[in-house]
């Protein structure tokens, strides 16, 4: 069971990480109810969170499966995570609204 | 380029065919030659064992070939492309077979 | 040639894609299916839907088959041992009439009825790497060319992509077809790039000795066995012609296990069965690492004495084994297996959308200029994409329809299945060229019908319907296969409905 939980956590970190990176882009920022351009500070915060989460996904993968399986798992799961973000942005964009709002408030 | 192909007169088709042969065939011949040369040279000059050098040379050859394919289609001058491929081909294959001759004492 | 680096890469990407797209799709599709080749075997050959062997079994059950191989003077006798994904023992040797293939139940030692199918491991998987074209190894070279082309397409695709980071997550399903298709092509291409590049490179690296033989030819005087003896420690005995026995299978297997600290065994392979100089090679099964191990122990056949064994690999060979292993996925990791399957499908989408984009961006212009290019490529695309899927589904359907031992026109059952595959595939091209307007939609309907029929026929002929398959652990592969077939049928139905709505809208506009 902890194996499955970890896998889910890896996917979640990859998904949220790419979601943060996507929101920091002007097109998606605007689409999610922000202004035309993502403010510099919010953008930096989002990118920082995004990369950190991808790094967390890597760390969790290595913990779960060791160096060789772990790196392979990370490299493939983040692709699935990114594709899922693309699907969310296309069909269920409101799922990402809370995340965008949170950053707007913080910014 | 599409237009060129669609109106493919014989004069326009020739450079394309030459380039295809040079990039795909010539690129392969050159990467295989470099692999042969590396497989001969590496064990003689470094501590890499012979069987390891063979595998290393062949594996790197895929990346060399990929580079040559990209360059083969990007190089504006067809003449320069052919010339360089021919020179490197002769040097690599000549070097590899020269070393084989040398080793067998012929 | 147009001026500029980007323009030349655009030319390369376009034409390599159009010319080799069909081949690439076939290889990617078959590779994606090969991820589950053993599971497909179980679905297509009900006699091997066995529960896993509980305890270790005696390899002496192989003795009668070994004696038959020895009597037939077969050059080799090879045995694939059970794994988690495959409960049966698979035995292969040659007699006067050709290869002899047997499947054995390890729990009882009985030989199971002839499966009468090449199924996943002997049709779909070899198709993936050699297209079943044995003549002069042309199949291998075509796949190699496609692999190189895939890497060149990856590189040139990145170069011609104008806004790779700005469009990183961009897919706009509400846009016009042409834009939507390009978005989908870009997204699957860019996000899947690491996987697609690595899977192509590792696939090529598996066959390095075939694709770049020059390295071993100049260092080992063109003597391939000499190289393999040096690099892999292969022991290859010369046949003497004198008869000789074979020591205990189990004793040699136990010795091999002891050498590898109790590790399981992958295969048993005898050279020169029945000869005084026979050698038995036993391979190690290590499902706990990515690398595809080639640890093996060699025994003198008649005496059973250990000749040599190898463990561990030098660095370059380890890299080669790692790349091979990450391509072969013979390791135990179900999450990665499913992820590979998903990313393989993403590769299929990438190739198919590449074709569609080419067609959509030229359709109008070609119609105005009266060019035939679009029509030809569209037929090629339909046959390569939906045609390939239909042929696969037909392969499954005919497998459930033909009775065991069936033969027709001098072809045995496995050959009839393969003929069905190729003829259906060919028919899909003909259909696409004859009815270009409606071919996509009609082929989607055909696919949906065939995939559903396959599930239904599996139920009728074996009794293993989905609920039953789900409730027995050893039938999960059957359940997985049925679920994927039904999912495929559902997607094909949705696609067909959308296409028919689009064509109706187009008709209204024309009227």
Image (cartoon, rainbow, N blue to C red):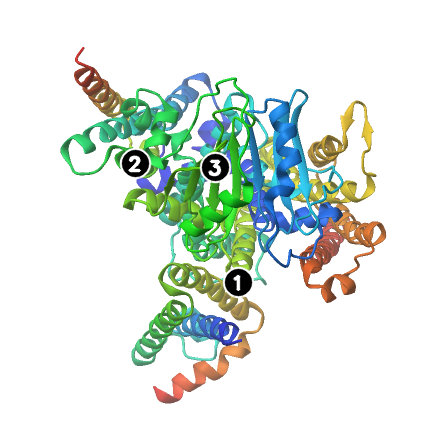
Q: How far is mark 1 from mark 3, CA to CA?
A: 40 Å
In this view, the mark in front (1 or 3): 3
Q: Could you tell me which residue is drawn at 61 percent across and 48 percent down?
A: C58
Q: Are marks 1 and 2 in contact (CB under 8 Å)?
A: no
**In the rendering, at what x and y percent does residue C443 appear?**
73, 44
| Label 1 or label 3, whichever comes before in sequence order | 3
Q: Which element carries disc 3, helix, strand or loop?
A: loop
Q: Are marks 3 and 2 in contact (CB under 8 Å)?
A: no
Q: Residues within 10 Å of mark 2 (few under 14, many from 20)?
A: some
Q: Chain of mark 2?
A: B
Q: Is residue A19 above or below residue C508?
A: below
**In the rendering, at what x and y percent does residue C181 appear?**
55, 52
Specify whether disc 1 shares its chain with disc 3.
yes
Q: Please identify the quadrant where the N terminus of chain C is shown.
A: top left
C30 relative to A5 in the view: left or right: right
C64 relative to C16 in the view: left or right: right
In this view, the mark in front (1 or 2): 1
Whether residue C196 is visible = no
Q: Residues within 10 Å of mark 3 (few under 14, many from 20)?
A: some
Q: Chain of mark 1?
A: C
Q: Residues within 10 Å of mark 1 (few under 14, many from 20)?
A: few
The numbered dot on residue B64 is 2
Q: Which element carries disc 2, helix, strand or loop?
A: helix
The numbered dot on residue C335 is 1
Whether residue C94 is visible = yes
**In the rendering, at what x and y percent does residue C112 appear?**
73, 43
- List the residue tagged with mark 3: C304
**In the rendering, at what x and y percent does residue C30 appear?**
59, 43
């Amino acid at each position: 069971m902890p194996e499955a939980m970890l896998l889910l956590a890896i996917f979640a970190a990859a998904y949220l990480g790419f979601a943060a990176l996507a929101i920091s882009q002007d097109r998606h920022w605007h689409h999610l109810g922000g202004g035309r351009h993502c403010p510099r500070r919010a953008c930096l915060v989002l990118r920082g969170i995004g990369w950190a989460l991808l790094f967390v996904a890597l760390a969790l993968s290595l913990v779960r499966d060791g160096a060789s399986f772990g790196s392979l798992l990370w490299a493939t799961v983040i692709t699935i995570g990114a594709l899922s973000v693309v699907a969310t942005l296309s069909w269920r964009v409101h799922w990402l609204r809370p995340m965008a709002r949170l950053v707007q408030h913080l910014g | 380029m599409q237009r060129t192909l669609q109106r493919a007169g014989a004069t326009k088709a020739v450079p394309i065919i030459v380039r295809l042969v040079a990039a795909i065939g010539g690129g392969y011949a050159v990467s295989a030659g470099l692999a042969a040369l590396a497989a001969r040279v590496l064990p003689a000059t470094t501590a890499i064992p012979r069987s390891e050098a063979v595998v290393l040379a062949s594996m790197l050859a895929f990346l060399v070939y990929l580079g040559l394919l990209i360059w083969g289609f990007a190089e504006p001058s067809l003449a320069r492309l052919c010339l360089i491929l021919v020179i490197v081909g002769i040097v690599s294959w000549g070097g590899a077979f020269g070393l084989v001759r040398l080793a067998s004492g012929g | 040639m147009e001026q500029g680096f980007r323009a030349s890469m655009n030319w390369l990407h376009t034409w390599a894609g159009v010319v080799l797209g069909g081949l690439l799709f076939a290889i990617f599709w078959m590779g994606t299916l090969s991820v589950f080749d053993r599971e497909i075997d179980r679905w297509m050959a009900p006699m091997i839907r066995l529960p896993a062997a509980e305890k270790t079994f005696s390899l002496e059950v192989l003795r009668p088959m070994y004696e038959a191989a020895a009597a037939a003077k077969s050059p080799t006798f090879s045995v694939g041992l059970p794994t988690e994904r495959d409960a049966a023992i698979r035995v292969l040797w040659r007699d006067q009439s050709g290869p002899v293939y047997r499947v054995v139940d390890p729990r009882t030692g009985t030989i199971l009825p002839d499966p009468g199918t090449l199924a996943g491991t002997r049709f779909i998987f070899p198709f993936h790497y050699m297209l079943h074209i044995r003549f002069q190894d042309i199949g291998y070279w075509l796949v190699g060319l496609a692999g190189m082309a895939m890497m060149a397409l990856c590189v040139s695709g990145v170069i011609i992509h104008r806004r790779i980071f700005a469009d990183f997550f961009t897919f706009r399903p509400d846009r016009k077809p042409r834009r939507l298709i390009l978005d989908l092509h870009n997204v699957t291409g860019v996000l899947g790039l690491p996987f697609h590049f690595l899977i192509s490179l590792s696939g090529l690296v598996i066959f390095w000795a075939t694709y770049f033989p020059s390295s071993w030819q100049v260092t080992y005087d063109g003597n391939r066995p000499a190289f393999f003896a040096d690099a892999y420690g292969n022991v290859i005995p010369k046949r003497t012609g004198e008869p000789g026995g074979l020591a205990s299978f189990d004793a040699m297997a136990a010795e091999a296990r002891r050498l590898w600290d109790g590790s399981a065994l992958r295969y048993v392979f005898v050279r020169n069965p029945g000869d005084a100089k026979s050698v038995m090679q036993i391979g190690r099964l290590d499902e706990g690492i990515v690398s595809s191990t080639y640890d093996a122990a060699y025994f003198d056949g008649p005496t059973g004495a250990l000749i040599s064994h190898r463990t561990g690999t030098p660095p370059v060979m380890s890299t080669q084994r790692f790349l091979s292993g990450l391509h072969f996925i013979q390791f135990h990791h179900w999450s990665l297996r499913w992820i590979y399957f998903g990313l393989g499908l993403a590769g299929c989408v990438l190739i198919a959308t590449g074709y569609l984009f080419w067609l959509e961006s030229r359709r109008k212009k070609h119609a105005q200029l009266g060019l035939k290019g679009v029509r030809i490529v569209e037929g090629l695309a339909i046959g390569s994409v939906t045609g390939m899927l239909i042929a696969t589904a037909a392969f499954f359907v005919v497998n459930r329809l033909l009775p065991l031992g069936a033969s027709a026109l001098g072809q045995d059952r496995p050959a009839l299945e393969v003929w069905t595959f190729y003829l259906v595939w060919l028919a899909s091209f003909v259909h696409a060229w004859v009815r270009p307007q409606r071919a996509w939609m009609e082929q989607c309907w055909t696919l949906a019908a065939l995939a559903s029929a396959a599930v239904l026929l599996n139920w009728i002929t074996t009794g293993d319907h989905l609920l039953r398959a789900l409730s027995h652990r050893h039938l999960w592969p059957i359940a997985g296969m049925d679920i994927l077939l039904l999912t495929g049928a559902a997607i094909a139905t949705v696609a067909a409905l959308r296409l028919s709505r689009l064509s109706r809208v187009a008709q209204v506009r024309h009227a």
